[in-house]
Image: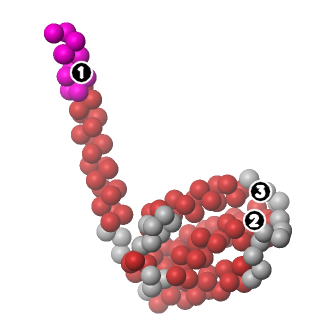
Amino acid sequence: MQHHRTPIRFMFRSLPRTLVALPLVLAASLAVAQQDPSVFPLDSVGYLNEELPRMEAAIAAKDRSFFHGAMVRTVEFSERWGFKVKANPDLAAYPMCTAAVMDYAVVGMCKLTPSEECEPGLASRFDANVQRCREVAARK
């Protein structure tokens, strides 16, 4: 009998922790689900405005390690909006913003260490997408 009481006692001990965490998990999932797609350009521009000066400083300092963190932050941003792993149809109106966010770290690495793997025209396409995203955000 003792053998059966231990798992039940453990369940009751861990229940308060589970109940405390549940609202946080639900709130986080609802926050992602309820994001207004029209805010995406403004959020993208805010993200890029924060990241681009840091990227330029890393390039000037020849700091390759910066780009690991930059990629992590880019993935986190894209996951928050749901466009990295799967397409988010609500963001289809803003391809310039999704492209700018996704290309930012690659463009920085190519500026830091130009190589044959760097696609010609990527930097100018990135700059154009950032500019178009800023224009769309300014209208919101």
The amino acid at mark 3 is Arg
- Is residue 21 located in the magenta-colored stretch of the structure? no
* The N terminus - image quarter: top left
Q: Which residue is mark 1?
A: 7
User: 14 above or below 86?
Assistant: above
CA gap, disc 2 and disc 1:
52 Å
The amino acid at mark 1 is Pro
Q: Residue at x 61, y 81 (%)?
A: 130
Q: Which residue is mark 3?
A: 64
Residue 46 at x, y percent in the picture: 54, 73
Identify the residue at the far left of this view: 1
Identify the residue at the far top of this view: 2
Q: Secondary structure at mark 1?
A: helix
- The answer to which of 18 and 134 lies nearer the viewer is 18
Q: Which residue is mark 2?
A: 109
Q: Residue at x 78, y 69 (%)?
A: 117
Judge the density around disc 1: few (<14), some (14-19), many (≥20) Cα neighbours within 10 Å.
Answer: few
Q: Is residue 74 left or right of residue 67?
A: left
Residue 75 at x, y percent in the picture: 55, 60
User: Of the residues tagged 1 and 3, which is closer to the observer?
Assistant: 1
Q: Which mark is residue 76?
A: none
Say if mark 2 contacts mark 1, CB within 8 Å. Answer: no
Residue 13 at x, y percent in the picture: 24, 25
Judge the density around disc 2: few (<14), some (14-19), many (≥20) Cα neighbours within 10 Å.
Answer: many
The amino acid at mark 2 is Met
Task: Give the quarter of the image for residue 118.
Answer: bottom right
Residue 14 visible at all: yes
Magenta-colored span: 1-12
CA gap, disc 1 and disc 3:
50 Å
